[in-house]
Image: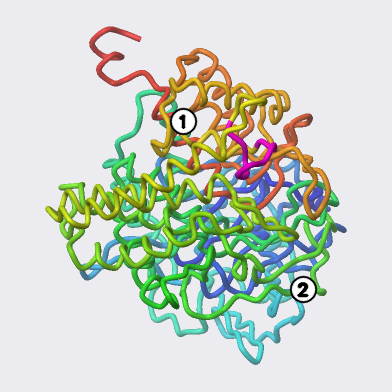
Amino acid sequence: MMAGPAMQDLNLAVVGNSIIAALVDRRGRIVWTCWPRIDGDPVFCSLLNDSAGDGSGGFFEIGLENFASATQSYVPNTAILTTTLTDAAGGAVRITDVAPRFKQFGRIFRPMMLLRRIEPVAGTPRIRIRLRPRFDYGALEPTRTFGSNHVRFLSPTTALRLTTDAPISYIAEESAFLLYGPINLILGPDEGFNANIADTAREFRERTEDYWLDWVRYLSVPFEWQEAVIRAAISLKLCAFEETGGIVAALTTSIPEAPDSGRTWDYRYCWLRDAFFVVHALNRLGATLTMEDYIRYITNVADSAEDGRLRPVYRIVAGRPLPERTIDGLAGYRGMGPVRDGNQAEDQVQNDAYGSVILAAAQMFFDRRLPRPGDLALFQRLERLGERAALSAFEPDAGPWEFRGRRSVHTFSTMMCWVACDRLAKIAAALGLPDRTTYWRHAADGIRNTLLERAWNAPLNSFVATLDGTDIDATLLLMQEVGFVSATDPRFLGTVAAVERTLKRGDYLLRYALPDDFGMPETAFTVCTFWYIDVLAAVGRRDEARALFEKILASCNHVGLLSEDIDPVSGVLWGNFPQTYSMVGLIVSAMRLSKSWEAAFWRGW
């Protein structure tokens, strides 16, 4: 008998190619895949519909009879995953998962395709292939038709085809069979396959491996924690939709921030704030092409913005709205709903977006590696956003934490409006435009002076989360990061102390510690802990920072990935997965804390 799957958790690996992505559990079961792109219909959705463990929500499983144990890892420095299943008698099978991605005909070939190779590695294992996609967010079970080497899965709006050199009858009836030699499963669009299956699978795997090895070779990684940084960088790449340049916050929807909290959100969209942090991290590693793609994306967004006003979040193909709706047919992660499609945040006012966009674009004007640096035309587009930032600096908004029930003038939002004007002044100076330099410097100084006065709370000896307020939130740690104050400023040091008193829970940091629309937060927001680590290093507490960084690294799952949130007591991962914010934090902190290559090789480590 084959043991049923255990309760779902976030010990998941990601296989993808910047068009589609699959989440694979520790036993090689694909539990989440959106089609035909990373924000599409989850054709494999058992991650959100399998609390009973019966797989009714859609999955792709290679099961092993008399299963005893599993091991899983990535092929080093690639997005290729291997899972080895072992049975009670010592028989074993290896599953290799690949989403093809490689250079071909002068461009990147990244088809809507998943390849699964299954091969015996010990004994004569007996396996069962169960392929059960669902369409329309789990509501539709597709009809099936069969050919000599394929199975088609059809609905009125969707069609998938599995092409394979495995016995079709075993797949059709989900019958167990002995695996005497390698077999290949190629899942993709409903198109004919006029090539040798085994040869194609082997070629695509080898060329994909070569692509990732080459991509990683040119990363500027730190001396320490290289494996963790490389895995984080690859995961960020898989969250970037390369066709348009949009970067999703995570690959999933509706994994709750905490058990039974109702905090279930759809993160398969591009938040301008989150995307900036991704670009920032990849730039530090030297992966500048993602930045160039993202500038192309936000230029299109900005050109379509009415009156220069930006929304905080957009689809990866910007233009269509993303109204939030509840999906009744999916029970939710571990049965904890609701499951949502779309995100109400698109209707919110979040005034930090202007600074996020201009910060992301600023490097285009200073990085001499880029073949197409920023020019006057791009600057003038950014000025349009800067004008809106100057007008919005002291307007109430939902803030970076997207409060649904109230608005305030948030310190972070106002600071990012200052960032927009400050960076435009610097860009104008680099372009030799003295009048525009003066204009934007005057605008930036006006915002800064007011913010310094109204965001400082003398009785608390701290900056506060809202102007004239008393609350503390973790974004205050970014004040030195963006250059608003120095790390040695006594006001900033007082703020760090206030954050520690108010938000620290064990080794982790909350976003804020006050009730919101859903009650009191229970879990730590992972990137906030990385912000705190960066601040510890900046203020001279480097040994503390390194020790805490090592503890947070231990919170990564078995393949080095992080979700949005961590339970500060149990260390269990919660929230959407993999969270770009969290992986960005890991990269930036590692690069700041690592011993230098020079110090390691010339002075010894």
76 sits left or right of 43 in the view: left
The amino acid beneath tag 1 is Ser
- Residue 415 location in percent, x, y? 47, 46
| Magenta span | 463-472
Above or below: residue 441 compared with residue 591: below
Identify which residue is drawn at 52% across, 58% down.
Answer: 351
Identify which residue is drawn at 18% across, 49% down.
Answer: 429
323 sits left or right of 481 in the view: right
- Residue 277 location in percent, x, y? 45, 47
Helix, strand or loop: magenta stretch: loop
Residue placed under numbered mark 1 in the picture: 589
The amino acid beneath tag 2 is Ile
Q: Quadrant of the C terminus?
A: top left
Regarding residue 8, the answer to whether it shows in the image is: yes
Q: Which residue is nearer to you in this view: 456 or 500?
A: 456
- Residue 558 location in percent, x, y? 61, 37
Q: Which residue is nearer to you in this view: 402 or 88?
A: 402
Give SS at disc 1.
helix
Labels in figure, total: 2
Which circle marks residue 527 in the picture? none
Residues packed near mark 1 inside 10 Å, few (<14), some (14 to 19) or many (20 plus): many
Task: Tell whether position 375 is magenta.
Answer: no
Regarding residue 559, the answer to whether it shows in the image is: no
Give SS at disc 2.
strand
Residue placed under numbered mark 2 in the picture: 327
Q: Quadrant of residue 339?
A: bottom right
Mark 1 vs mark 2: which is more N-terminal? 2
59 sits left or right of 292 in the view: right
Above or below: residue 190 compared with residue 300: below
Colouring mode (rainbow / by chain / secondary structure / one colour)? rainbow
467 sits left or right of 430 in the view: right
Above or below: residue 164 compared with residue 568: below
